[in-house]
Image: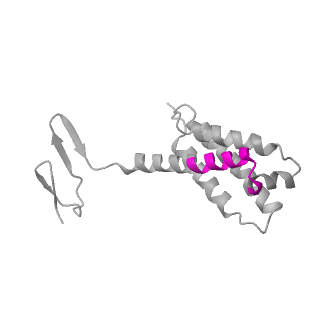
């Protein structure tokens, strides 16, 4: 299958990088990394905003682990931090620290599920921890 782009024929199965000139602009193959990065950012922000809101609302399933540890009011602190870090993922100067902070909450969640609640799956906290680590790696500050 071939496509016509800017009045030129383009074969998407061709191994060659296609670059077209349109006016003064250079239009090249779609760069997937920024799209994947923003997709991951949106996913993490959505998950942690929802988790934070549920903790602040006092939803039993999200507050119960803190009650089992004897720190029921800590759920409000963790919920507020999750929401703040989810917002921080979209602020350029805070992205890296926000990803690290969310990763730290997942280390705590993983430890809790591993030691105090073994019948619950630890997989979600491990997956989110991994995604936070990937985000921190992508958003780490560049050194000169």
Query: Given the current orientation, which residue lies at the most extreme bottom position?
Result: 119
Is 29 within the magenta? no
For this view, does 11 lie left or right of residue 73?
A: left
Tell me which residue sits at (80%, 63%) in the image.
117
In front of the other: 30 or 69? 69
Picture quadrant where residue 100 is located:
top right
From what the image shows, is residue 135 above or below residue 114? above
Residue at 79% across / 66% down in the picture? 118
**How would you classify the magenta stretch by its main secondary structure?**
helix
Name which residue lies at 80% across and 43% down.
74
Residue 125 is situated, as x and y percent measured from the top left of the image, at 67, 57
Q: Quadrant of the N terminus?
A: bottom left
Q: Position of residue 3 (x, y in %)?
A: 17, 58
Magenta segment, which residues?
A: 46-61
Percent x, y of residue 137: 55, 45
Q: Residue at x 76, y 42 (%)?
A: 76
């Amino acid at each position: 299958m071939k496509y016509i782009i800017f009045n030129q024929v383009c074969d998407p199965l061709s191994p060659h990088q296609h670059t077209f000139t349109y006016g003064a602009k250079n239009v090249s193959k779609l760069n997937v990394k920024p799209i994947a990065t923003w997709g991951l950012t949106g996913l993490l922000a959505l998950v942690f905003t929802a988790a934070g809101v549920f903790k602040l609302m006092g939803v039993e399933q999200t507050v119960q682990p803190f009650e089992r540890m004897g720190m029921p009011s800590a759920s409000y602190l963790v919920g507020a931090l999750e929401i703040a870090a989810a917002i921080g993922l979209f602020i350029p100067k805070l992205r890296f620290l926000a990803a690290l902070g969310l990763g730290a909450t997942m280390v705590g969640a993983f430890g809790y599920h591993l030691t105090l609640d073994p019948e619950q799956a630890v997989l979600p906290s491990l997956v989110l921890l991994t995604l936070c680590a990937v985000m921190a790696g992508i958003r780490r500050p560049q050194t000169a």
